[in-house]
C-alpha cells in the first residue's frame, strides 16, 4: 500500500512539473518513478509511453523521450536495451518526435540496427559459419540445453583474460549441458589455429569439450550487426529453444544466470518428484487405456509449454514405475518409454538417461517377465571357482539375492531355512547370491546363520553382468524358475513359496 501511495505522489509531481514545462531538475522525479517499477521491459515500455503522453507539447515530449532513451541506453541492467530500441523506433526514427541529441538520427539508426535483432526474449539470429578445419556449422544444429555464443578476437587484451575464465565457467556448469558457439571475429584460419594452440592446449593435445570454434570465411554472415559485435568479447546465453536469455554478459553475470537456471531446473525436478506418486494413484496402471489417459494429457501440455518440465515429470514417471516390484507397473514403464521417451529423444537434455538408462531398463523388464527364459550366467562360489548360477537337472530353482547389512534379508533367510528340506524333497533347489563387497563379513554371516544351500559371491565384473541381465530391484529379491530357466515367479517371499509348492 505504501508503495502505491508513493507512486501516486511521484505521478502527481510529474504532472505538476510538466504543466510548467520540462527541465533537467525534473529528471530526478522521472528516475524515482522508473525505480519504483519492476525492471521488466514490457512494464517499463508502458511507463515510458505514459510519461511521454503526460504533456501535449511536442518539445516537452521530445525532451522526455530523449531523456528516457539516454536513461536506458546508459543503464547497466541487462534487458534495458529493449526499452531504448522501442523509444528510438516508435518516437524518433518514425519522425513522430524530433531527436536533438548527439549523433543525430544516424546514431539512433545505428544503435537500433545493431541491437534490434538480439534482444532479451528474442529468437537468436541464425548463424552458419565454418567450423575450424571442418564444414559449415549451424548455430541451430547444436542440440544442448543452453548455448553460449562467444565472439572473440586473438588480439583483444580483454579476451585473453576472459577466455580462460569462461572455460572454467563452462566446466563448472557442464552438468547443465552447455554448448559454446565460439565465433572468431576475423576470417583468418591460421590466426585461429594459433589462438587455439595457445589457449586450449593440454597435455600436448588440443582439448575444447563442448566448444565449437567457427569463423566467417566469406564475410557475408553479418554477425556484427545481428549481435551488436562492435567490440570483443561479446557473450550471449540462449536456452534450449535458442531464445536469448542473456546478452553482453561478463563472467559474473553468466555465472549468476547459470546458477539461476540450475536452481530453476532443481525446482522443476523437486516438484515433479512430489507430484508423480500422487498423480499415478488416480489410474489403474494395468489397463492400457488408462495408461494413455495418464500420460497423453501430460505429454501434450508439457511439450507445448515447458520442455524442461517435460523432462522432469517424465523422468520421475519412469523412475517411479521402474522401481516397483509388480509386473503391471513395470510394464507401464515400458509403455511410457516406447510412447513418450524413445520417439522424442531430441527433447531430452540428459542423453545418458535416454540412451543408456531407459533402454537398459526396458530390456531388463521385457527379458525378465514371467514366461521369459533367462540366459545362463557364471558366478564365483565362495572358493572363487566359477559355476552356473542356474543349476541343471532340477525340477525348479529358487535364486535369491541378499546383502549382510539388509535388515529384511535375515528373516527372509530364516523363513526359507524352515522350508528348505521340504523344498529339497520336491527337487526345488535354492541358491543365494551375495551382492555386497565384504567377503569377511559374509563368512561370519554364513557361519552364524548356518545356511544349508550354495552361496555365490560374484566378482565386480560378474556383478555388472548380473545387474545388466536380471532385475534386482531391492534385497531380498527372488526368482523362481523351472528346469528350462523359464521364469515362473519373481519377488516372492518364503510364505508365498510355501503356498505355491508345499
Image: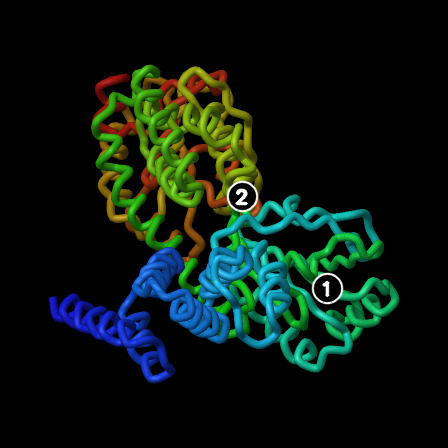
Query: Within 10 angstroms of label 1, few (less than 14), some, or many (20 or more) residues?
Result: some
Q: Position of residue 17 (x, y in %)?
A: 26, 76
Instruction: Identify the residue at the far right of this view.
Output: 190
Q: Is residue 347 left or right of residue 302?
A: right
Above or below, 382 against 9 in this view is above
Q: Are marks 2 and 1 in contact (CB under 8 Å)?
A: no
Q: Position of residue 138 (x, y in %)?
A: 70, 47
For the residue pair 362 and 351, the one nearer the viewer reads as 351
- Comparing marks 2 and 1, which lies closer to the viewer? 1
Instruction: Identify the residue at the far left of this view.
Output: 1
Question: Which residue: 17% across, 72% down?
Answer: 9
Q: In the rendering, which numbered label is found on residue 133? A: none
Query: Within 10 angstroms of label 2, few (less than 14), some, or many (20 or more) residues?
Result: few
Quadrant position of the N terminus in the picture: bottom left
Above or below, 78 against 46 in this view is below
SS for tag 1?
loop
**Can residue 201 be seen by looking at this rendering?**
yes
**Can residue 430 be seen by looking at this rendering?**
no
Q: In the rendering, which numbered label is found on residue 464? A: 2
Question: Which residue: 82% across, 51% down?
Answer: 134
Above or below, 81 against 309 in this view is below
Q: Is residue 274 left or right of residue 4?
A: right
SS for tag 2?
helix
Question: Which residue: 43% across, 73% down?
Answer: 67
Question: Which residue: 53% across, 43% down?
Answer: 464
Q: CA distance from mark 2 to mark 1?
A: 31 Å
Q: In the rendering, which numbered label is found on residue 207? A: 1
Q: Is residue 50 left or right of residue 440?
A: left
Q: Position of residue 396 (x, y in %)?
A: 40, 19
Q: Position of residue 444 (x, y in %)?
A: 35, 55
Amino acid at each position: 500500500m505504501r508503495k502505491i501511495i508513493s507512486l501516486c505522489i511521484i505521478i502527481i509531481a510529474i504532472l505538476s512539473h510538466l504543466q510548467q514545462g520540462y527541465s533537467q531538475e525534473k529528471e530526478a522525479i522521472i528516475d524515482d518513478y522508473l525505480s519504483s517499477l519492476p525492471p521488466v521491459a514490457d512494464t517499463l515500455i508502458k511507463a515510458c509511453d505514459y510519461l511521454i503522453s503526460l504533456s501535449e507539447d511536442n518539445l516537452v515530449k521530445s525532451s522526455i523521450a530523449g531523456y528516457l532513451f539516454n536513461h536506458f541506453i546508459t543503464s547497466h541492467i541487462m534487458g534495458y536495451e529493449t526499452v531504448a530500441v522501442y523509444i528510438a523506433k516508435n518516437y524518433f526514427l518514425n519522425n513522430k518526435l524530433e531527436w536533438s541529441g548527439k549523433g543525430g538520427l544516424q546514431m539512433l539508426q545505428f544503435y537500433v540496427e545493431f541491437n534490434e535483432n538480439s534482444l532479451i526474449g528474442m529468437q537468436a539470429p541464425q548463424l552458419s559459419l565454418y567450423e575450424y578445419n571442418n564444414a559449415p556449422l549451424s548455430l541451430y544444429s547444436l542440440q544442448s540445453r543452453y548455448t553460449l555464443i562467444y565472439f572473440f578476437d586473438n588480439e583483444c587484451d580483454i579476451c585473453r583474460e576472459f577466455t580462460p575464465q569462461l572455460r572454467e565457467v563452462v566446466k563448472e556448469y557442464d552438468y547443465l549441458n552447455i554448448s559454446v558457439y565460439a565465433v572468431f571475429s576475423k576470417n583468418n584460419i591460421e590466426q585461429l589455429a594459433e589462438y587455439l594452440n595457445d589457449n586450449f592446449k593440454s597435455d600436448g593435445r588440443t582439448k575444447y569439450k563442448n566448444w565449437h570454434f567457427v569463423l566467417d570465411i566469406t564475410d557475408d554472415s553479418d554477425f556484427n550487426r545481428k549481435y551488436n559485435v562492435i567490440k570483443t568479447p561479446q557473450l550471449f546465453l540462449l536456452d534450449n529453444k535458442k531464445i536469448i536469455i542473456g546478452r553482453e554478459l561478463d563472467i559474473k553475470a553468466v555465472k549468476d544466470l547459470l546458477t539461476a537456471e540450475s536452481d530453476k531446473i532443481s525446482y522443476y525436478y523437486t516438484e515433479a518428484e512430489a507430484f508423480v506418486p500422487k498423480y499415478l494413484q488416480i489410474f489403474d496402471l494395468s489397463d492400457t487405456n488408462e495408461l494413455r489417459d495418464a500420460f497423453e494429457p501430460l505429454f501434450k501440455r508439457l511439450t507445448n509449454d515447458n520442455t524442461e518440465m517435460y523432462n522432469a515429470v517424465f523422468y520421475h514417471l519412469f523412475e517411479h514405475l521402474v522401481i516397483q516390484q509388480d509386473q503391471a507397473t513395470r510394464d507401464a514403464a515400458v509403455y511410457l518409454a516406447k510412447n513418450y521417451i524413445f520417439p522424442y529423444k531430441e527433447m531430452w537434455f540428459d542423453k545418458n538417461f535416454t540412451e543408456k538408462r531407459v533402454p537398459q531398463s526396458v530390456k531388463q523388464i521385457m527379458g525378465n517377465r514371467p514366461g521369459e527364459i533367462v540366459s545362463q550366467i557364471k558366478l564365483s562360489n565362495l572358493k572363487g571357482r566359477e559355476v552356473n548360477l542356474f543349476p541343471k537337472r532340477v525340477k525348479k530353482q529358487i535364486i535369491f539375492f541378499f546383502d549382510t547389512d539388509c535388515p529384511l534379508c535375515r528373516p527372509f533367510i530364516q523363513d526359507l531355512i524352515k522350508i528348505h528340506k521340504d523344498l529339497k524333497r520336491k527337487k526345488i533347489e535354492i541358491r543365494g547370491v551375495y551382492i555386497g563387497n565384504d567377503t569377511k563379513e559374509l563368512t561370519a554371516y554364513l557361519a552364524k546363520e548356518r545356511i544349508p544351500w550354495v552361496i555365490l559371491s560374484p566378482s565386480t565384473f560378474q556383478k555388472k553382468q548380473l545387474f545388466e541381465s536380471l532385475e534386482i530391484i531391492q534385497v531380498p529379491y527372488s526368482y523362481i524358475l523351472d528346469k528350462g530357466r523359464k521364469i515362473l515367479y519373481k519377488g516372492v517371499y518364503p510364505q508365498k513359496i510355501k503356498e505355491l509348492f508345499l
